Structures are given as C-alpha cells and as structure tokens.
Image: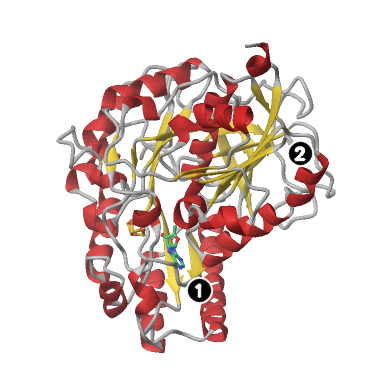
Amino acid sequence: MWETMRTKRLYINTMGCQMNVYDSDQIRNRLASLGYVPVDAPEGADLIIVNTCAIRDKAEQKAFSFLGRLAPLKTVKPDLIIGIGGCVAQQEGRKILSRMPYVDLVFGTHAIARLPRTIERISATRCRVVDVALSEGVEAEDFVSGPLVTSDVSAFVTIMRGCDNYCTYCVVPYVRGRESSRAPDAILDEIRHLVNHGVREVTLLGQNVNSYGLKEGLPGFDQLLEQVNRVEGLARIRFTTSHPKDLSDALMHAFGRLEKLCPHIHLPVQSGSDVVLKRMNRRYSSGQYLEKVARLRQIRPEMAITSDIIVGFPGESEQDFAATLELIRQVRFDSLFAFIYSDRPNAPAVRFDGKIAEAVKKERLQRVLAFQERITAQKHQAMIGDVHLVLVDGPSKHPSSTADSPPSDGQSEPGQWAGRTGGNKIVHFAGEGQAGAPNQILTGRMMPIMIERAMAHSLWGRPVPDPRASAVEGEPLCCIKPAWPV
Ligand code: 5AD
Ligand code: SF4
C-alpha cells in the first residue's frame, strides 16, 4: 500500500490540439490517485508520458524525435516508466514497442480511464502494454473532474469525441474513433466544478461540435449552449471546432441570443475551390460557406471569424489556389491557420494522384500567410480607439524583443497584463498590481480596455472607466454589445 501511495514524479509532454491538452489534464487527475505529482522536466521523473499528435506528418516526426531523446534517461534510471499516448500511439500501436525498446506503454485515445490500472500493472510486473482499443460510445467514467491542477482563468471541456466526417486528408476518424457525445448533465457538472475553482471561461471541445448529440438523440448543441449560458459565475463561453456544413440556423442565432457566448467562431474552410472541396469530401461549396459567414455577421456584426486552410492538396491547380486567395479576400478572416498538405496513413487522399511538389506547396503557404497578415494588420489597426472588454488571463509573458512588445523602452515592465477580447484577440495593458507575486489582483477580471496600438499578433491598450454603470463585479460579462464601439 505504502509503495503505491508514495509520491512519484510525473512528466507529461503534450503535443497537438486542445483535445490533447484536455486529455493530459485528465491523465494528471487520474494518476494523482496513484500518488503521482506533475513535474516540469523529464529528468528525474518516475513516469514520462508523451501525448502525441498525428494530424500532420511534421507533428508525428516531432513526437518520435522527442521519444528518441528519452532513451538515455532509461539507462540512468531503469525503473522509469515511459508511456506514449494520443493519436500517434493509436495509429502505430504495437509497432512502437518494436521500434523503441525502452517504451513500456502504448495507450490510445480511449484508454485514459484505464491508465491507473495499467500503470500499476507495469510497476508491479514490468510488463510492456499496448492498449489501443476504441469504444463505440462515451461512458460517464471516461471523464473525471479531479482536483484542478491549474489555476487558469480559462479551461477546456470535452463535450464529444471522434468524428464521422471522413474528410479525405484527415486521420482523426481513424485515431479518435466514431463520433460520440457526453450527456449534458455530466458536461454541466464539470463546468460548475471548474467555476467553483475560479475558472471564468470555458471552451467546449469536439471535432465537430455542431453535430453534438445528434446520434444519441440528446438536446442539440444550441440547447447545450443555452444551458451552459445559465451556469452562475461563468463569464464566457467559446467552442471549437465547427464544420461549416453542420452550422445550423439555430446555432447562428445562439450568437445573437446568449450573452456569454463570445462573438468568435473557428470555421475551417480548408479551400476556396469547389473542385478541391469536393475531393476533400467537405460537402459544402465556397458559395455556401460565404453565405454562412454573411449570415453570422448579420446576426452578430462584431463576429470574429478564423479558419484553417490546407495548401497543396493533391490536384490543387494554380487556379484552385487562386480561388482560395479570393475566398480569403472576400471573408477577411481575423486570423488563419494555414497548413501544407501531408499524406496521412489510412486517409484516402494518400492514394490520390496529382501530388504537389514540396516547393510549390511551400510557396503557396507563404502567399496565404502574407495575404492574411496584411488583413490581420488592417483589422488590428481599425480597432485603435475602440473599447473592448478583456478577460484578464494573468501577467503578460511577452518577450520584450518581439514585434508584439508594448510601446516601452523595450523592457518587460512589471504590472503588465494580458487578456483576450470576446473576439479572441490578445490585448496587453499596464494596470494596477505588480506582475511579480503577489499578482492575482487582475487575473480573472473583466476589464474595459481602450485599444491604443496594433501589433502583428496582439494589441496594446489602457484600462478605462467601465461605461456600463450598472455592471456588477462578478456578473457574467462577455464582450461588447452593439452599444459599444467594436
Ligand atoms: N495535411 C495538412 N493539414 C491537415 N489538417 C488535417 N489533416 C491534414 C493533412 N493531412 C489540418 C486541417 C484541419 C487542421 C486541424 O489540420 O486544416 O482543420
Ligand atoms: Fe478531420 Fe474532417 Fe473530422 Fe475535422 S471534420 S476531424 S477535418 S475528418
């Protein structure tokens, strides 16, 4: 008994998307019951877990290169347990054990609930384990609300997992399994638990949140949002990711109705060419996408829209690529994530002809990024003089040498803070309280900030008196309503 409850050090390296960030928190919470406490470095840890991402080839290579660097640690500390989890583990399974003899455990995306038992077994017997079974639905016990290990203002909450869309470039349906949704009560309980621990903003996570609950006959996503909106003490709601084909009228109207729902949507378009969209199996046209964007802006004019683009999908001609630039020109996204297409095992596009040369893909990526950079800069400039409600995340962490430093003598000043607008723009400002300890004075507060300066990836502003004279501190405030300048 003493042996299992002895304090042990756990190091987790989390790669990839917010789902993995959430999963790593679940892993920490579960392993706390075995006496594992998180540490910041792999050296000296008793258990190392690498939570991997397989979405693009580059991410997978990064995971293997990190794992390669762990081999010497095992030589120094033979009782160290090394586990690899997440999407690469799910995809490669047993193959990892033969490729890396020092890895003790390969566990898939649905194996987290079983992890404590698996680790106990490995500790007791030093056996090597592969656990990559995928289940059909989600069970309540697949998720735990453990003691919070972060003091964050903002937290992720997984509301569904898996994906049934089968976009032809994408590995997710193969590594995260079939789409399945959590029951609303479990989600609401988790959010209340987070709020009781000081969290003020939640981001609801799923590969395609718009189809939340459809399979299970649960209330739809807009109804779930309505219930989350009623959680006392919660200030802001965000969600990601949305599939444009499933973006319903009801959800669009939720943006006009729910005061805590931030005016921001991440709506990956992937391409502006209808031919490419068809080959990607996205099941919408560029025209339908533009219509949804227009509708969203009609309902909530200050709506920030961000997106994902893939360049160099097999068969993408110069004309197809020009259509993507044209769509970007028309939408004027607030920001974009652009990726070079890479073949993924299992995804059908591996077998598509018309593969694009690396040099062409790189050149297209640069063109997309440069184009978007100009749009973002213009949008940031246009915000100067406006007042935005900013939810303060904590002291600013910007290095003084970046282009995003606030206007100063180049030093990182004490008393500088960072937060986000409802539209998810990062704002730095100088405020009361020192950025060194004790520094919790502004963290978690919703502050009106006048934007004074625009930088490439963020904004700089100054706190102004709260014009909402009737506002009560602690009252849920999300973002600027139409009466405010936006
Ligand atoms: N190659 C490049 N980008 C990809 N994405 C998904 N699969 C691939 C791939 N094989 C991108 C998409 C998706 C984002 C999370 O990653 O743009 O929206
Ligand atoms: Fe992948 Fe498409 Fe599912 Fe998104 S919707 S996770 S891109 S298959």
Q: Are marks 2 and 1 in contact (CB under 8 Å)?
A: no
Residues 250 and 458: in front is: 250
Residue 247, visible in the rendered structure: yes
Q: Quadrant of residue 47?
A: top right
Residues 194 and 11: in front is: 11
Q: Position of residue 119 (x, y in %)?
A: 57, 31
Q: Report the label total.
A: 2
Q: Position of residue 229 (x, y in %)?
A: 32, 27
In the picture of the structure, the residue carrying the numbered disc 2 is 78
Residue 28, visible in the rendered structure: no
**Circle 1 sits in a helix, a strand or a loop, which is it?**
helix
* Residue at figure coordinates x 39%, y 87% from the top left: 354
Residues 120 and 317: in front is: 120
Earlier sequence position, callout 2 versus callout 1: 2
Quadrant of the image where one finds ligand 2: bottom left
* Residue at figure coordinates x 49%, y 25% from the top left: 200
Quarter holding the N terminus is top right
How crowded pointer 1 is (Cα within 10 Å; few <14, some 14-19, many 20+) is rated as many
* In the rendered image, the vertical position of residue 105 relative to residue 57, given as above or below: above
As measured in the structure, the alpha-carbon distance from the residue carrying label 2 to the one carrying label 1 is: 48 Å
In the picture of the structure, the residue carrying the numbered disc 1 is 368
**Circle 2 sits in a helix, a strand or a loop, which is it?**
loop
Question: Hey, what amino acid is under mark 1?
Answer: Val
Q: Position of residue 365 (x, y in %)?
A: 53, 75
Question: Hey, what amino acid is under mark 2?
Answer: Pro
Question: Within 8 Å of ligand 1, the CB of disc 2?
Answer: no
User: In the image, which is nearer the foreground, mark 2 or mark 1?
Assistant: 2
* Residue at figure coordinates x 54%, y 18% from the top left: 147
Q: Position of residue 439 (x, y in %)?
A: 72, 23
